[in-house]
Amino acid sequence: MNPTNSNKKAINSPNPPSGVSDRLQVIANGGSVPAEIHPAIHDEDSVLDIRDFRLWYGEAQALFDINFSIPRGKVTAMIGPSGCGKSTLLRSVNRLNDLIDSVRISGDMILNGRSIYEPSVDVIELRKRMGMVFQKSNPFPMSIYENVIYPLRIDGERNHGVLDEVCERSLRGAALWEEVKDRLHESALGLSGGQQQRLCIARAISAEPDVLLMDEPCSALDPLATNKIEELIDQLKGDYTILIVTHNMQQAARSSDYTAFMYLGHVVEYGPTETLFQKPLLQETQDYVTGRFG
């Protein structure tokens, strides 16, 4: 994947719904408008700085001039209509998009002061620093215990005392220990859907990642399991920096400290969640969070 400085417009961009403001029409027509970044962001200690980031799938541009910072120890949500680039941006943070041959990028992402796109960066090591929780839970076909300690196993850790400690700590961190402590050596595939997703979170935090990435982690869960995941996110923040993609605006409002509203590959507005939902700077954001379009 070779960085490029070209600036091609997206192809086949849909027109925005009637009634939305000119800013979104400009974006839909292939133009560019600066994101509205709330001043509160600048007071935070950032763990990740995204700078002039663009991404293409072949000739089609999917992300445009993304510039914002992810505050350390906080929960940042990305919201926006389907296809707006939320998951693409999330998967750029741990360079999962590198696995797609047609992808190319320009710009940069700075993690704790170092570019994740430097030629010298070991991508496998980078991904170990990024816990990833996918839309659909993906426990491995092995025991609950082995699922949790898998990141340590592949790093060569063989000390049973260390593995046992990490397993318990991670399961407690994922609010799952009390439910599974007597069945650690049973198959993880026997857990319920909500338990499997919390197991995946336990596996993700076992390596103590710099950033925990969550891509629609509750979309396949029932309301009760969703509530448990949201409670868990609240417990994990502070210890972990969490970046979450969600279509559920109520979930973003409940669970995040900061929210970025995206549209057709652009960040439109980014600020404290309470402000963005109750008194955004832009009418476009107001229209989206109140359900007038999207």
Image: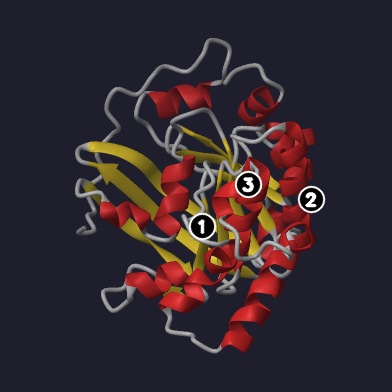
Disc 2 element: helix
- Which disc is residue 132 wearing? 1
Name which residue lies at 35% across and 49% down.
54
* Residue 7, picture quadrant: top left
- Ranked by sequence position, the earlier of labels 1 and 3 is 3
Q: Amino acid at mark 2?
A: Glu
Q: Are marks 1 and 2 in contact (CB under 8 Å)?
A: no
Disc 3 element: strand
Q: CA distance from mark 1 to mark 3?
A: 15 Å
Query: Quick one: label 1, few (<14), some, or many (20+) residues within 10 Å?
Result: many
Question: Is the residue 86 above or below the residue 291 in the image?
Answer: below
Question: Is the residue 66 above or below the residue 143 in the image?
Answer: above
Name which residue lies at 20% across and 49% down.
101
> Can residue 154 be seen in the rendering of this structure?
yes
Q: Amino acid at mark 1?
A: Met
- Ranked by sequence position, the earlier of labels 1 and 2 is 1
Residue 99, given in percent of the width and then of the height, sits at: 27, 54
In the picture of the structure, the residue carrying the numbered disc 2 is 231
Name which residue lies at 42% across and 52% down.
91
Q: Quadrant of the C terminus?
A: top right
Name which residue lies at 37% across and 59% down.
95
